[in-house]
Image: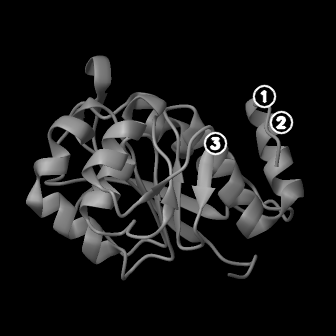
Amino acid sequence: MSNNRQWKVGIFLFDNVEVLDFAGPFEVFSVTTSENGEKPFAVETISEVGNMVSARNGLKVQPDYSIDNMPQFDILIIPGGLGAREREIHNENVIKWIANQKQNVQLMTSVCTGSLLLAKAGLLKNKKCTTHWASLERLEKEFPEVDVQRDVKFVDEKDIITSGGISAGINMSFHIVKRLLGDKVAQKTAKRMEYDIVV
């Protein structure tokens, strides 16, 4: 991936999605500017049918696209939350979409229990990954072919990156910024957000 391009970042939304799971990465990628002052990331949101979603604790969010009319993204972020682990993991349409998107994106990522959806889609087989600490045992039990990592903010498996719970998605996002654009840009973005990172 070269530095003089713009990456299209898609964030999947659903009812009862954890707010910081998607808002943290949205903020990191949205405020990042390259050393020449350009915006290296264009961030947009998707839901299954494009309707407004009610995130955790009632925050209403209107997605930009449905999974049927969205453009092709370079980076796809699958957040977690109550809606992921109780409903979307049983939503065959969404799981099939995630599996298919893996063929189209350069980076498939998850935050928190979004990793359960990646695992259900068959994307984490024989790969290291992580999730929210309270769901580590569930991930191991339901998907024994997955190599679950504990006590880490994120796990980078090249084309798939999973992160721990909620605020860990911000750490993962800074890691991606550093990976694509270098340490200097990542540090500048963190300073703008007044966020302490170790990259």
Q: Viewed as shown, does residue 80 lie left or right of 53?
A: right
Q: Is residue 197 visible?
A: yes
Q: Residue 152 — which label? A: 3
Q: Residue 33 — which label? A: none
| Lower position in the chain sequence, tag 3 or tag 1 | 3
Q: Give the amino acid type for the residue marked by disc 1 in the picture.
A: Glu
Q: Which residue matches tag 2?
A: 191
Q: Residue at x 29, y 69 (%)?
A: 122
Contact (Cβ within 8 Å) of mark 1 with mark 2:
yes
Q: Measure how far apart labels 1 and 2 are at the Cα level.
A: 5 Å
Mark 1 lies on a secondary structure that is loop
Q: Give the amino acid type for the residue marked by disc 2 in the picture.
A: Lys
Q: Residue at x 18, y 59 (%)?
A: 94
Q: Give the amino acid type for the residue marked by disc 3 in the picture.
A: Val
Q: Position of residue 139 (x, y in %)?
A: 34, 46
Q: Residue at x 25, y 41 (%)?
A: 84
Q: Residue 194 — which label? A: 1
Q: Measure how far apart labels 3 and 1 are at the Cα level.
A: 22 Å
Contact (Cβ within 8 Å) of mark 3 with mark 1:
no
| Lower position in the chain sequence, tag 3 or tag 2 | 3
Q: Quadrant of residue 48?
A: bottom left
Mark 2 lies on a secondary structure that is helix
Which of pointers 3 and 1 indicates the residue nearer the eye?
Answer: 3
Q: Viewed as shown, does residue 104 lie left or right of 37?
A: left
